[in-house]
């Protein structure tokens, strides 16, 4: 089982992105449930906006996942700039999830 981020991701408002994507290639021997955690960053040091999010539990019959990612420390996301997205899938048991490459995705304004 693996995933990726939708491109583009929607901005809920200037401080919050809805991170989401498909749950792909869930095989019969994969664990029955998973949770996803994400880290989104935008900009270059020292002006980096960062936020993290975590989903609830998803199962084989769920086609997609989503979670809200709020910018840390009252920062705001720039709808005109790409966001670097890193996701991690934690399966409820072995085997581990497949590899998930980082992605740079666009944003859609609220």
Image (cartoon, rainbow, N blue to C red):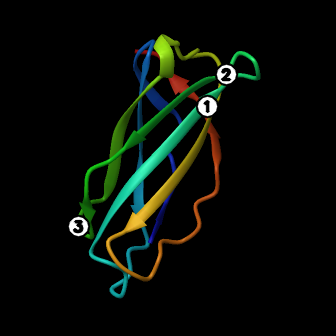
Q: Disc 3 on helix, strand or loop?
A: loop
Q: Is residue 4 above or below residue 42?
A: below
Residue holding disc 1: 41
Q: Which residue is outermost to the bottom?
A: 29
Q: Disc 1 on helix, strand or loop?
A: strand
Residue holding disc 2: 48
Q: Residue 45 in the image: x percent, y percent?
A: 76, 22
Q: Disc 2 on helix, strand or loop?
A: loop
Q: Residue 4 in the image: x percent, y percent?
A: 52, 54
Residue 62 left/right relative to 104: left
Q: Is residue 6 visible?
A: no
Q: Residue at 52%, 13% (x, y): give it.
A: 75
Q: Residue at 48%, 22% (x, y): give it.
A: 71
Q: Residue 9 in the image: x percent, y percent?
A: 48, 33
Structural distance between the alpha carbons of marks 2 and 3: 37 Å
Q: Residue at 36%, 88% (x, y): give it.
A: 29
Residue 48 left/right relative to 66: right
Which marked residue is nearer to the observer: mark 1 or mark 3?
1
Q: Which mark is residue 61?
A: 3
Q: Is residue 34 above or below residue 45?
A: below
Of mark 2 and mark 3, the one earlier in the sequence is: 2
- Are there few (<14), some (14-19), or many (20+) residues within 10 Å of tag 2? few
Which marked residue is nearer to the observer: mark 2 or mark 3?
2
Of mark 1 and mark 3, the one earlier in the sequence is: 1
Q: Which residue is outermost to the front?
A: 73
Query: Looking at the rendering, which quadrant does residue 54 occupy?
Result: top left
Structural distance between the alpha carbons of marks 1 and 3: 30 Å
């Amino acid at each position: 089982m693996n995933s990726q981020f939708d491109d583009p991701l929607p901005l809920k408002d200037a401080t919050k992105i809805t991170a989401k994507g498909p749950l792909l290639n869930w095989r019969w021997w994969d664990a029955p449930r998973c949770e996803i955690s994400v880290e989104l960053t935008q900009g270059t040091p020292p002006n980096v906006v960062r936020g993290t999010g975590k989903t609830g539990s998803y199962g084989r019959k769920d086609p997609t996942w989503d979670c809200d990612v709020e910018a840390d420390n009252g920062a705001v996301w720039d709808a005109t700039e790409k966001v670097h997205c890193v996701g991690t899938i934690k399966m409820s048991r072995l085997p581990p999830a497949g590899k998930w490459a980082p992605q740079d995705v666009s944003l859609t304004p609220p």
